[in-house]
Every structure is written in structure tokens, then in C-alpha cells.
């Protein structure tokens, strides 16, 4: 086969809609409106404090990011702190520290601004994707209105609250902004008026993808999404075999970056013992968790109520439980229906598969952390659904002049935006401080033992030892195998002179903690100063026990 030469982005022969055809009020008003509604919906976050949910590990108890000196920058570039490799996110936090010190308002403001910018870039993505999907360059105002609807639903959905209102989630909004920038540049590369312009856009897409991975590795599946866009709506697979080969070759650098990010992410998680071994969480349990997550995120997208900062993974997940079996059947059913409708509605299967691939790194197949699911994992994965809603909005706007039903549908979409904004505003206030956050988590799920453990820690920090002990007792009543709760109650007992109770909790906690995990390190560290005394007490009790 002849050498195809350098990979060139496909260039369309028709020019894009000229800006003169779109009134300035629309061109500038819609993105400005997005910025306004995002700012209003998340305004309560500016009054929020840091919370006892990794903000201590990442920010308040971490001096390493506080500065821009060579030693600080070297740490950012080399650290796997808390099981992540995210030098660009550390740099953004360092810039916050330079301006704001340890005032939480600055960190929350940056999160809000990054998310608002991501919404505007996603709006740009929606414009170019919907324009190609409908093969139409007419009705540009309606198209932009539909794109704005898609971006608004993405931006002010309550599932976005965790990423915006949680300071530690800086990695998510920053990498998300760069991820959407990569998608937008990629589509523009294949709408460019010349090969040279197309190459520039393609290079910008690859660079944005690289930066996104330096903020967080979760966008590693972007090459699959770009391939889906090549199939529909770009239609780049309609040509012959040589053209298809060029399309695949074009993905090689993207795939290389994605694989490198996956390898680094695995390496980062290893020393933190963040990944749960297969022996503790088997293959069947992981598959059950993955299918449950796929259905759970779809359900919460449609019904965003009773959201929590922590949906706790069961200590012993039973794959045969009804909710896991039902989730597997739903996933199989959606995939089968979308496959059968491929020739009529190719966008349905591609949107579904894009969603599956985007969220796949955080579905629990390589389990990391105590959660079975998390709201923040929908940040990128929600994009295909928002685009589908935008497409529906476009059809509604076109038919609104001829159909009362279509007009009612458009009104329903606008009403939906109002409801989502109100829910987001309220959910953002849940993150006001540690007490409000974990009290809310307990209200959502009274069996959430870790929520009690985390609220107890906040109480202990504030000097409420009685309340802390009560919550730790409740956490261990729900889950006696929780090593972190055992450690914290042991430390509380030890501080109060109850060495016998401390010994009981420490030894029990060590039986349940994974070697190298945070709980294991805390337990061994807390036992060390009292080890001889605890061993003497333990030996005395055994000697005093009747035979």
C-alpha cells in the first residue's frame, strides 16, 4: 500500500454560517446569558467554607502547593499526592493561594469561573455539532438557541454542584474546560476552509487534550468520542478505505496521550492504596457496580433529587441483588434497542456508547475510593445527553410557529431550566461547611456510616467530643468493619484515657484496613506512641481472664 503521507484533517467545501447572518444580540447575548445564569445558580458557593472531605488533605493541611517557587513547581510536577497526578490543577490552586491566601472564597470563585467558561465552550461545541447533524445552515438563530439550551442544561444541572462547590474538585472543572476545548477545535479542524487552517485546529485540539490530562486523567477516552463524531455527524467514514485509514491514523497521537494518562493514573493510585484489590471486590461485583453506575447517572440526570456527596459502596456487594440485576438488564436493553435503530437513528447508539466510554474509567472496574458512584463523574459524561436535548430543542423551535404542541414543548424546556437552576442553587448551599454537608448526606441515606464518621471528625475538630463519640458509635453500629471509624474512636478514647477501649478499636481497625491505606497508616501511627502500654494492658487482661 502506498504511503498516505501526513495525516490531513478533512476539509468541507461549504463555508460556515457567516456571523453577519446572526444578529449581534444573539451572538453575544446567548453566551453572556449562560455566564449570568451559571453565576446565579452557583452564587451560594462563594459563601462556602472548605469541607472535611479531602479539602483538608488537598488544601488546608497541605503546604506544598502554596507558592510558585521552583521547589513548589517541582513538587507539582512530580507528586502523586492523594492518588492523583494533576500538575495543572495544582498550579491553578497555587495561583489562588498567591491571590487569596487561605480564604476559601477565592478557590470557590475560580471553580465557578472555570465552570462558566466550560459552559460557553460547550455551547460552541453544540453549535458546530448540531449544525452538522442537521445538515443545515439555515435558521442560525434557532440553532444557536438550541445550542444554548443544551449548554444551559449541562451547566446548571444539580449534578454539576459537586464539581463547582467542592474546592477539591478543581481538577474536574479545569480538565472539563480543556476537554470541551479539544472537542470544539477538532470539529472546527474538519470545517476549516483550508488544510493549513485545519492542521492548526487539529494541533490546538491535541494540545488542549494534553492539558486536560495534566489537570486530571479522567478525559482519557476522548479518542473514542472523536471517532464517534467522525462517524456522525461529521460523516468521515462514508469515504473509501484510504480515507478511513487517514481518520484512524489521525487518532494515533490522541490514543497515545490517553494511554499515557491511564498508565500515570494507575501509577499515582498505587502508592496511596486507593485501588481496591480484586480479592476484596471481585469481577462480578465490579461488573454489577459498573452497570448500576450507568443506570444511576441516567436516573439522576432525569430526576436530580436526593443528591449526596457520598453514595457509599457496600462492604460486601452482592451482584445478584435486585438493583444490580435490574441495572444489567437496563444496560443490555438500551444497547440492544439503540443497535436495532442504528440505520434510522445512528445518533442514538453513538450518544449512548459515547456516554458509556466517557464514564467507563470511573465505573468501578478499577475501584478507587469508598463510593459506588459520584455526582462529579457526570461532568463529562452528561455531554451526549445535553446534545440530544439541544437537538430536540432545535426541532421544537423550528416547529413552534406551526404547532401549538411544539410551542408548549419549548415552554416546558424553559420551565425545566428554571427548576434545574433552583435545585442547583439549593444543592450548592449543602456544601456550606462540613456540618451541613454530612448532615445532608445522613438525611439522604441514614445507613451511610462514613457520613457519620466524617461528621464526627468535624465535631471533634470543633471540640464536641460527646457528639463525635455518638456519631462514631452509630457509624460502627452500621458498619463494624470501618477502619477509619475505628481509628477515630480509638484516638478519641485514647485522648480521654480509655486505653482499653482504644486498644480494642485499634486492633479491630487493623484487621479490616488494607495495608498501605490511609486508615492503616493512621491506625499504626496512633498506636505507635502507646504500643508498649497497650500491649502491657492487653497481656494483663489476658492473664487476669479465667481459664
Image: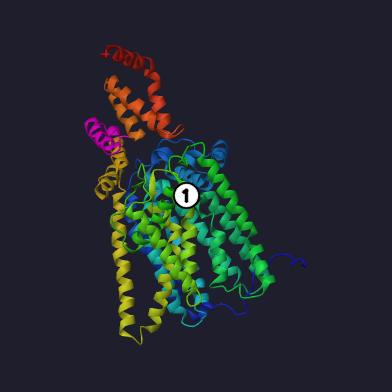
User: Quick check: 437 left or right of 74?
Assistant: left
Q: Which residue bears the numbered disc 1? A: 365
Toward the front, the furthest residue is 547
Tell me if mark 1 has few (under 14), some (14-19) or many (20+) residues whose alpha carbon lies within 10 angstroms of its own: many
Residue 248 % position (x, y): 64, 64
Toward the right, the furthest residue is 2
In which quadrant is the N terminus drawn? bottom right
Magenta residues (range)? 458-480
User: Quick check: 456 left or right of 240?
Assistant: left
Magenta span contains residue 461: yes
* Residue at image point 27% right, 34% down: 472
Residue 265 % position (x, y): 53, 45
User: Quick check: 452 left or right of 70?
Assistant: left
Secondary structure character of the magenta stretch overall: helix
Residue 216 shows in this picture: yes
Front in this rendered view, residue 442 or 495: 442
* Residue at image point 51% right, 50% down: 215
Magenta span contains residue 197: no
Residue 171 % position (x, y): 47, 49
Describe the element under mark 1 as helix, strand or loop.
loop
Amino acid at each position: 500500500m502506498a504511503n498516505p503521507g501526513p495525516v490531513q484533517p478533512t476539509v468541507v467545501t461549504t463555508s460556515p454560517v457567516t456571523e453577519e447572518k446572526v444578529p449581534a444580540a444573539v451572538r453575544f447575548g446567548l453566551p453572556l446569558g449562560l455566564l449570568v445564569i451559571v453565576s446565579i445558580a452557583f452564587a451560594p458557593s462563594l459563601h462556602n467554607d472548605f469541607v472535611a472531605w479531602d479539602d483538608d488533605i488537598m488544601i488546608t493541611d497541605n503546604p506544598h502547593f502554596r507558592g510558585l517557587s521552583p521547589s513548589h513547581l517541582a513538587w507539582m510536577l512530580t507528586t502523586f499526592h492523594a492518588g492523583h497526578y494533576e500538575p495543572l490543577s495544582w498550579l491553578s490552586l497555587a495561583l489562588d493561594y498567591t491571590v487569596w491566601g487561605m480564604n476559601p472564597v477565592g478557590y470557590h470563585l475560580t471553580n465557578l469561573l472555570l465552570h462558566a467558561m466550560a459552559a460557553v465552550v460547550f455551547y460552541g461545541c453544540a453549535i458546530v455539532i448540531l449544525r452538522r447533524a442537521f445538515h443545515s445552515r439555515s435558521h442560525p438563530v434557532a440553532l444557536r438557541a438550541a445550542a444554548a439550551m443544551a449548554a444551559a442544561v449541562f451547566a446548571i444541572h444539580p449534578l454539576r454542584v459537586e464539581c463547582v462547590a467542592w474546592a477539591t474538585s478543581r481538577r474536574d472543572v479545569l480538565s472539563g474546560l480543556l476537554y470541551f476545548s479539544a472537542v470544539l477545535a477538532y470539529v472546527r479542524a474538519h470545517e476549516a476552509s483550508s488544510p493549513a487552517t485545519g492542521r492548526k485546529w487539529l494541533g490546538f485540539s491535541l494540545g488542549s487534550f494534553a492539558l486536560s490530562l495534566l489537570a486530571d486523567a479522567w478525559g482519557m477516552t476522548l479518542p473514542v468520542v472523536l471517532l464517534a463524531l467522525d462517524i456522525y455527524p461529521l460523516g468521515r467514514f462514508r469515504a473509501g478505505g484510504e480515507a478511513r485509514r487517514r481518520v484512524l491514523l489521525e487518532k494515533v497521537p490522541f490514543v497515545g496521550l490517553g494511554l499515557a494518562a491511564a498508565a500515570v493514573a494507575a501509577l499515582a493510585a498505587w502508592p496511596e492504596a486507593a485501588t481496591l484489590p480484586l480479592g476484596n471486590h471481585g469481577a462480578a461485583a465490579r461488573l454489577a457496580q459498573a452497570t448500576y453506575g450507568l443506570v444511576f447517572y441516567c436516573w439522576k440526570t432525569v430526576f436530580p433529587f436526593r443528591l449526596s456527596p457520598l453514595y457509599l459502596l457496600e462492604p460486601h456487594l452482592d451482584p445478584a441483588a435486585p438493583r444490580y440485576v435490574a441495572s444489567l438488564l437496563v444496560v443490555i436493553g438500551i444497547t440492544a434497542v439503540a443497535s436495532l435503530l442504528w440505520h434510522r437513528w445512528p445518533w442514538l447508539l453513538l450518544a449512548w456508547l459515547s456516554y458509556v466510554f466517557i464514564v467507563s474509567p470511573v465505573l468501578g472496574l478499577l475501584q478507587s475510593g469508598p463510593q459506588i458512584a459520584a455526582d462529579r463523574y457526570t461532568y463529562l459524561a452528561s455531554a451526549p445527553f445535553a446534545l440530544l436535548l439541544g437537538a430536540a430543542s432545535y426541532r421544537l423551535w423550528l416547529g413552534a410557529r406551526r404547532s401549538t404542541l411544539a410551542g408548549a414543548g419549548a415552554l416546558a424546556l424553559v420551565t425545566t431550566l428554571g427548576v434545574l437552576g433552583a435545585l442547583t442553587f439549593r444543592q450548592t448551599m449543602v456544601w456550606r461547611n462540613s456540618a451541613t454537608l454530612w448532615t445532608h448526606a445522613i438525611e439522604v441515606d441514614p445507613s451511610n456510616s462514613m457520613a457519620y464518621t466524617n461528621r464526627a471528625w468535624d465535631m471533634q475538630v470543633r471540640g464536641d467530643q460527646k457528639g463525635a463519640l455518638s456519631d462514631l458509635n452509630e457509624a460502627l453500629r452500621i458498619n463494624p468493619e470501618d477502619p477509619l471509624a475505628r481509628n477515630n474512636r480509638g484516638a478519641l478514647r485514647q485522648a480521654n484515657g480509655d486505653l482499653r477501649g482504644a486498644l480494642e478499636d485499634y486492633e479491630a481497625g487493623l484487621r479490616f484496613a488494607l495495608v498501605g491505606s490511609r486508615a492503616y497508616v493512621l491506625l499504626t501511627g496512633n498506636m505507635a506512641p502507646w504500643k508498649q502500654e497497650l500491649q502491657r494492658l492487653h497481656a494483663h487482661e489476658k492473664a487476669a481472664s479465667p481459664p
